Amino acid sequence: DQQVKQNSPSLSVQEGRISILNCDYTNSMFDYFLWYKKYPAEGPTFLISISSIKDKNEDGRFTVFLNKSAKHLSLHIVPSQPGDSAVYFCAASALPGNQFYFGTGTSLTVIP
Amino acid sequence: DAEITQSPRHKITETGRQVTLACHQTWNHNNMFWYRQDLGHGLRLIHYSYGVQDTNKGEVSDGYSVSRSNTEDLPLTLESAASSQTSVYFCASSGPYEQYFGPGTRLTVT
């Protein structure tokens, strides 16, 4: 049973606009969440994280929001750039550094 | 700079053969992981280790084994390769927070 779900397999956005990628989870024990970005033929690279004691974390153009009561997190990219085109995975863990559960990924295309 | 490497990057093998994929990290991390990535399934955990001599089964461990004899390496062995094991395999290691991934090995079983 998939404990972390990304229900949108793909997303297209115009350059300069906001990209919003969503992720839902089922396990209430999850306390630490990460987003990874993956280009073709490369390994995933860490993008941004958030722990359950926060509801928002920002890093430049990337912001992650966490709604624990809804078991939902989202990644906002503003403004979107063509170089952001990649597959984005969300991941969740009950303990940072230990076993993570990954979503199925959302393929983002930013149109110039 | 610390890194995590995988070899080979590409491998073609025949059904029934034993195959070993190598993973080496220089982060000095205790925690290491093997995933496979398939369309529609994302990243699924095969095996993981929290230190030397420690190994644990993940979500899709059938047909795979790992051993951890030192901190740096976690080789993944397919005992008898099957066509269903055609996939891209990623190794990762983690410090206190996030996981760092290797570049992946594309394995084709014919």
Image (cartoon, rainbow, N blue to C red):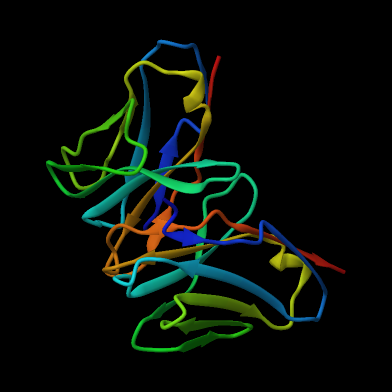
Q: Is residue A107 left or right of residue A27?
A: right
- Dividing the picture into quadrants, the one containing residue B100 is bottom left
- Could you tell me which residue is drawn at 42 percent across and 18 percent down? B81
Farthest right residue in view: A112
User: As drawn, is B93 to the left or to the right of A71?
Assistant: left
Q: Residue B74, position in %: x, y? A: 28, 39
For the question of whether residue A73 can be seen, the reply is yes
Residue B1 at least partly seen: no
Counting labels gives 0
Q: Nearer the viewer, residue A57 or A23?
A: A23
What is the quadrant of residue A106 in the picture?
A: bottom right
Residue B55, by quadrant, is top left
B14 horizontally vs A52: left or right: right
Above or below, comparing residue A5 to residue A43 in the picture: below
Residue A16 as seen in the image, left or right of residue A75: right
Q: Position of residue A79 (x, y in %)?
A: 74, 82
Picture coordinates of residue B66, whole percent (x, y)? 25, 34
- For the point 44% across and 67% down, the residue is A25
Q: Please, is residue B57 above or below residue A32 in the view?
A: above
Instruction: Pick the residue in front: B80 or B103.
Output: B80
Residue B31 in the image: state x and y as whole percent.
25, 54
Q: Is residue A18 above or below residue A26?
A: below
Q: Residue at image x 32%, y 35%?
A: B61
The residue located at (57%, 48%) in the rendering is A42
Check the picture and name the quadrant holding the C terminus of chain A.
bottom right
